[in-house]
Amino acid sequence: MKELLIVANWKMNKTKAEAKSFLAEFLPLVKETKAKIVIAPSFTVLDFLTSQLKNTKISVASQNMFFASFGAFTGEVSADMLLELGVEYVILGHSERRQYFLETDSLVNKKALFALENNLKPIICVGETLEQKTAGLSMQIVKEQITQTLKNVEENHLDNITIAYEPVWAIGTGKAMSSEEADLMAEYIVNLVKENLNTTKAVKVLYGGSVNETNANEFFARNNISGALVGGTSLNAQKFAKLIVG
Ligand code: PGA
């Protein structure tokens, strides 16, 4: 059985007090799971979460990061700042960052390279919009995103990289992609990464977009899908635990 990687993307939700009550409810429910769980809270809750999760197998991710160690970059957070708190992963290039904060593939590439050099594990998000899907461009878009965001990434970093395939039209809409279609895209991504990094090893690909406690197992059963990036459902301790333990 493959080890599943299940990442909670809390987006701009949960204060520290809310995170505290989430953990009180959630931790007892997932004690026995073999899945690797990662939680990505807001910056303001990172410190609290890493300290609370210290003696568990659950890791913490940041939802963003800048590509310099320090300096005059108002509003940004560096890799060192995240590492000091015990953060292990960083989500990069989420479609909301691309849409609202105009992040490009080349910016995501800079961040990914910087994360890898600094021992943070990037979770790089790719995926097509509805318009692009309707125009039959899904594969072309994903190919471009993978090629650009992984530019100059070395093969020896492969184990620390995760790709999250999140069709934009499926995010927060309650309309997940079919697991069959998601698996085909995941296979396409695995092959693209092999080509780009000149390796025979398969990168981990997560599916994201309206994954919930009832449809998650369909995705987890697929050969090329290594887990999920979960937004809405990860805010509810009971539902998120059910998504994980089945
Ligand atoms: P969703 O979000 O699960 O609410 O669709 C997923 C994501 O944006 O990462």
Image (cartoon, rainbow, N blue to C red):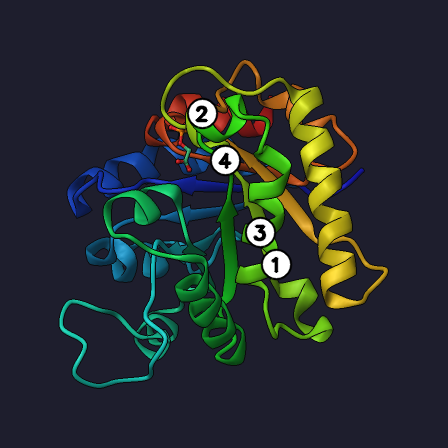
Can residue 36 be seen in the rendering of this structure?
no
Report the residue marked by disc 2: 130
Residue 128 numbered tag: 4
Q: Tell me how far mark 3 sits from mark 4, CA to CA.
A: 11 Å
Question: What amino acid is at disc 1?
Answer: Thr
Closer to the chain start, of discs 4 and 1, is: 4
Q: Residue at x 50, y 24 (%)?
A: 211
Question: What amino acid is at disc 4?
Answer: Glu
Q: Is residue 130 above or below residue 94?
A: above
Question: What amino acid is at disc 3?
Answer: Glu
Closer to the chain start, of discs 3 and 4, is: 4
Report the residue marked by disc 1: 147
Percent from the top left, x then y, of residue 235?
32, 31
Report the residue marked by disc 3: 144
Question: What amino acid is at disc 2?
Answer: Leu
Element at label 2: helix
Q: Residue at x 68, y 34 (%)?
A: 185
Q: Is residue 216 above or below residue 194?
A: above
Q: Tell me how far mark 3 sits from mark 2, CA to CA.
A: 17 Å
Percent from the top left, x then y, of residue 6?
54, 40
Q: Residue at x 47, y 72 (%)?
A: 115
